[in-house]
Image: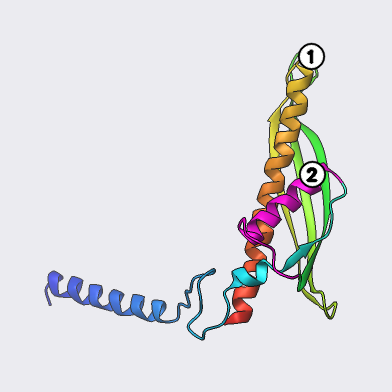
Amino acid sequence: MSLSDFTGRFRVLGLVCALFVLAGCNVRPLYGTISTGSAPAQEELAAIDIDPADDRVQQVLRNELIFLFQRGGEAAPARYRLRMILNSTKSSVAVEELSDVPAAYLVQMTTSFALSEVATGRTLLTGSTFANASYDFSNQRFANLRAARDAEDRAAKVIADDIHTRIAAYFAEQKS
């Protein structure tokens, strides 16, 4: 047996193994219609009512989720309710060498959420997610306030994307 025969057989064997691996793959579009004719996950997402916010950061998170769920369209009649608990902390991560003043801060956010049916009150999905965002500290007061607010907004958007993806995946799984 020559080296080229061995290489050719090895390639064919690799191709057959790859086909077996891909045969078990179940890929389908998250927002498209499924071949059974059921409604896409987007219709379920538009029917989620989100509890009111208590502060500015929670309002940013809520607004992001509303936009992600409704895609800028009209809200459907509420069939689901999303409750969230957001915790946020700020800590210094770098200190100026000679002045002992923070040079950078880290905003850490953790959110627990629960999705339930409005009609029955039955909990469908629970989870927790987190995000971190850092910002530099300067000697300008207004710049520090804006940098902190921007870091909070960035972290809230990351959390909103994660919650949206998890809930969309849940509905897509239920439809299959």
Question: Looking at the rendering, in which quadrant would you find the N terminus?
Answer: bottom left
Q: Residue furthest front?
A: 74
The reply to whether residue 95 is in sight is no
Q: Quadrant of residue 151?
A: top right
> Residue 1 vs residue 51: left or right?
left
- Stretch of the chain drawn in magenta: 55-77
Q: Amino acid at mark 2?
A: Val
User: Which tag is nearer the camera, tag 2 or tag 1?
Assistant: 2
Q: Nearer the viewer, residue 48 or 102?
A: 48
Q: Quadrant of residue 163?
A: bottom right
Q: Secondary structure at mark 1?
A: loop
Q: Amino acid at mark 1?
A: Ser
- At 73% from the left edge and 22% from the top edge, which residue is drawn? 143
Q: Residue furthest right?
A: 54
Circle 1 crowding by C-alpha within 10 Å: few under 14, some 14–19, many from 20: few
Q: Nearer the viewer, residue 49 or 172?
A: 49
Q: From this view, report whether residue 86 is shown above or below residue 170.
A: above
Circle 2 crowding by C-alpha within 10 Å: few under 14, some 14–19, many from 20: many
Q: Position of residue 36 (x, y in %)?
A: 51, 86
- At 79% from the left edge and 14% from the top edge, which residue is drawn? 99
Check disc 1 and report the residue beneath it: 99
- At 74% from the left edge and 36% from the top edge, which residue is drawn? 106
Q: CA distance from mark 2 to mark 1?
A: 31 Å
Check disc 2 and report the residue beneath it: 57
